[in-house]
Image (tube, rainbow, N blue to C red):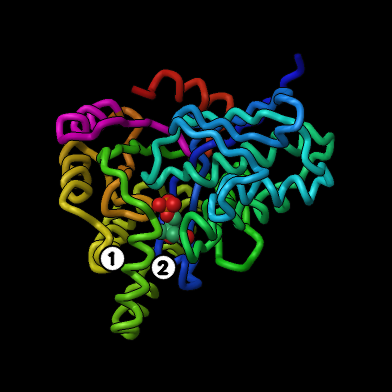
């Protein structure tokens, strides 16, 4: 029996979430320690494409799946753009990326499916094409996505992202290490994005000032990353976190993990992604990573990842295996 498998990484936003929905830049990087995988094998005759999602105990037959289902939607779009018709295929989708936690689980799952379908069709798609298809499913997941998640995951490299523009890869002069920690609280991005929108509609002047301030932080972070001034990134993360607090998207749990990371030696810390729950990250000196990881665990983190940004992928993946707890 033939099988075709493709995968996609998770992601973290280093700087700029929420303001990126309003045209300010963001910096995001893939996180290959967590992955979504789609495996295609022959299905029963006459069933068409069936998505099997054992992690959430669901089966979606594309012939009759709800049009509002993001994964059914992106699969239909991919089948059409690859001229595949309706083959009898079973697509098993697994993911180690926690749901609704700011690590890009929706975009990664959709990317894995699109990549697997394009491989099965023998028509490899460019990252820009994958990203554009996945963006369509993000619209169903999020409502008004900026496009940062589908972009960083489909391109699988650190990106400087501005809504509506092609992503700009940028150079990382000196690798740096972050510890990512999960509050364990699922928080759908659509809710926090909706709340920020309501805040902005009620008081546009205040929110525009906050978004501009985030934009300045993101520009300063890019300069620091490109010049290898890693230490400067810590205070910039703290500042970005304060601005996200002012937007109302932090939470007691995220604030507690950020404080724990700083007191265990992190150079700076912030929430990452939609907020209210999900993950935060702390910038650390390599030698302090385990100490900060342990401080975060004592403060209630349910899972931590230590990742190096700006190193060759194979090295990073070797570290990933060692550091994922
Ligand atoms: O999917 P999340 O939780 O990482 O959030 C994506 C980042 C936001 O800026 C909050 C939303 C967006 O579409 O950019």
Q: Is residue 308 magenta?
A: yes
Q: Give the magenta-colored segment's residue range.
A: 290-309
Q: Does the residue labelled 1 lie within 8 Å of ligand 1?
A: no
Residue 176 falls in which quadrant of the image? top left
Q: Position of residue 134 (x, y in %)?
A: 62, 51
Helix, strand or loop under label 2 = helix
Q: In this view, does 117 lie to the left or right of 203?
A: right
Q: Where is residue 111 in the image (x, y as percent from the top left)?
A: 62, 42
Q: In this view, does 39 lie above or below 177?
A: above
Observer-nearest residue: 3 or 111?
A: 3
Q: Where is residue 110 in the image (x, y as percent from the top left)?
A: 59, 43
- Disc 1 crowd rating (10 Å Cα; few below 14, some 14-19, many 20+) is many
Q: Is mark 2 within 8 Å of ligand 1?
A: yes
Marks 1 and 2 in Cβ contact (< 8 Å): yes
Question: Reading the chain from its start, which is encountered first: label 1 or label 2?
Answer: 2
Q: In this view, does 257 lie above or below 204?
A: above
Q: Which residue is drawn at 52% across and 32% down?
A: 53
Observer-nearest residue: 133 or 294?
A: 133
- Ligand 1: give its quadrant: bottom left
């Amino acid at each position: 029996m033939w099988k075709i498998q493709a995968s996609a990484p998770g992601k973290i936003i280093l700087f700029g979430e929420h303001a990126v929905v309003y045209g300010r830049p963001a910096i995001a990087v893939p996180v290959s320690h967590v992955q979504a995988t789609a495996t295609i094998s022959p299905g029963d005759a006459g069933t068409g494409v069936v998505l099997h999602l054992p992690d959430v105990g669901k089966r979606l037959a594309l012939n009759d799946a709800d049009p509002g289902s993001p994964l059914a939607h992106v699969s239909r779009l991919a089948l059409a753009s690859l001229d595949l018709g309706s083959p009898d295929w079973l697509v098993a989708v697994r993911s180690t990326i926690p749901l609704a936690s700011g690590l890009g689980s929706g975009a990664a799952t959709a990317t894995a499916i699109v990549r697997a379908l394009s491989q099965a069709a023998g028509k490899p798609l460019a990252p820009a094409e994958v990203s554009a298809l996945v963006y369509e499913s993000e619209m169903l997941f999020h409502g008004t996505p900026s496009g940062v998640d589908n972009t960083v995951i489909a391109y699988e490299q650190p990106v400087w992202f501005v809504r509506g523009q092609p992503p700009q890869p940028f150079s990382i002069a000196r690798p740096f290490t972050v510890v990512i920690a999960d509050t364990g609280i699922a928080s759908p991005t659509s809710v926090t994005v909706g709340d920020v929108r309501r805040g902005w509609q009620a008081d546009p002047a205040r929110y525009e000032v906050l978004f501009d301030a985030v934009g300045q932080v993101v520009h300063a972070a890019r300069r620091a990353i490109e010049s290898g001034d890693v230490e400067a990134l810590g205070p910039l993360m703290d500042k970005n976190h304060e601005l996200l607090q002012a937007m109302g998207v932090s939470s007691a749990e995220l604030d507690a993990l950020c404080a724990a990371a700083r007191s265990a030696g992190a150079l700076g810390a912030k929430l990452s992604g939609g907020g209210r729950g999900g993950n935060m990250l702390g910038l650390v000196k390599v030698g302090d990573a385990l100490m900060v990881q342990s401080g975060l665990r004592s403060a209630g983190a349910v899972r931590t990842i230590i990742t190096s940004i700006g190193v060759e992928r194979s090295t990073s993946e070797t570290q990933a295996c060692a550091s994922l707890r």
